[in-house]
Image (tube, rainbow, N blue to C red):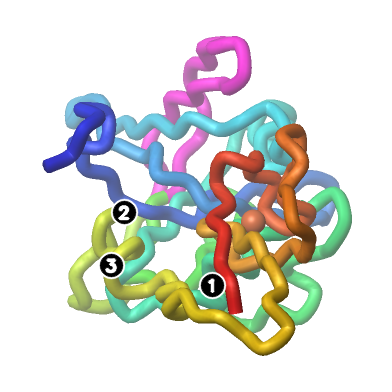
Amino acid sequence: MSMNPMFSIQYGLFVVTACQDGRDNGCITNTVMQVTSQPNRISVTVNKENLTHDMIKATGRFTASIISEKADFGLFKHFGFQSGREVDKFADFADCRRVKNGTLAVTKGTNAFISANVVQMVDLGTHTLFVGEVVEMEPLTDVPSATYTYYQEHIKPKPEPVGVTSEGKTVWRCVICGYEYEGEELPEDFICPICKHPASDFEKIVR
Ligand code: FE
């Protein structure tokens, strides 16, 4: 049984993209939803620390590519576990297509895209909620959408079983991205260098 009712809310997964001054970027979110049908509007909530946030805020344009059950873990690593402030995520990424509002739709591991132009922004402190008028949308495949639960159960690599090595080395593994920290104790304020999740998202493994 889920101990936290917040974990009972079901979410989809999306690559949300933006383009500013010729520079493309995108990030993974679970926060896209349709908010009204007439007019057809969607919302997306993006963390202010994401470069994509600043780009949507500046340009008022974004595309949500809907991740399907055929997506592999590499898609999540590529768009979720690195920052557009450090790498150009589209520099060597071919599985995408320029759509009418100037942003890129991701075409592999996704089953549709929806482009929107922002009509309202709500400052939520750590995040901004963008409401956008849908300007273009297209189905790509009939593969079902990946829910967050599906991702956890079928796409995210399973941790290896706990065992003991001859060296008895202690390893702490980030349950989000798989990064491994070696050391007897994990510092309480440790932040995963790959996905930026805190020490509470690390599990101790022995091998
Ligand atoms: Fe991590």
Q: Quick one: SS at disc 1?
A: helix
Task: Give the quadrant of residue 37.
Answer: top left
User: Tag 2, which secondary structure?
Assistant: helix
Outermost residue to the bottom: 166
Query: Closer to the camera: disc 3 or disc 2?
Result: 3
Q: Is residue 206 above or below residue 87?
A: below
Q: Earlier in the sequence, mark 3 or mark 1?
A: 1
Q: Which residue is mark 3?
A: 153
Q: Position of residue 83 (x, y in %)?
A: 76, 53
Cα distance in 3D space between marks 1 and 2: 14 Å
Q: Earlier in the sequence, mark 1 or mark 2?
A: 1
Q: Which residues are magenta?
A: 115-136
Quadrant of image for the C terminus = bottom right
Residue underneath mark 2:
148
Q: Residue 87: within the magenta?
A: no
Q: How many residues crowd mark 2 within 10 Å: few (<14), some (14–19), many (20+)?
A: some
Q: Is residue 172 left or right of residue 31?
A: right
How far apart, in angstroms, are the residues tagged by discs 3 and 1? 16 Å
Q: Main secondary structure of the magenta part?
A: strand
Is residue 108 something one can see in this rendering?
A: no
**Of label 3 and label 2, which has the lower sequence position?**
2
Residue at image point 58% right, 22% down: 127
Say which amino acid is labelled 2. Answer: Tyr
Q: Pick whichever, 25 or 80, lies toward us.
A: 80
Q: Does the residue at mark 1 contact the one at mark 2 (Cβ under 8 Å)?
A: no
Mark 1 is on which residue type? Leu
Q: Quadrant of residue 1?
A: top left
What residue is shown with label 1? 75
Helix, strand, or loop for circle 3?
helix
Label 2 CB-ligand 1 distance < 8 A: no
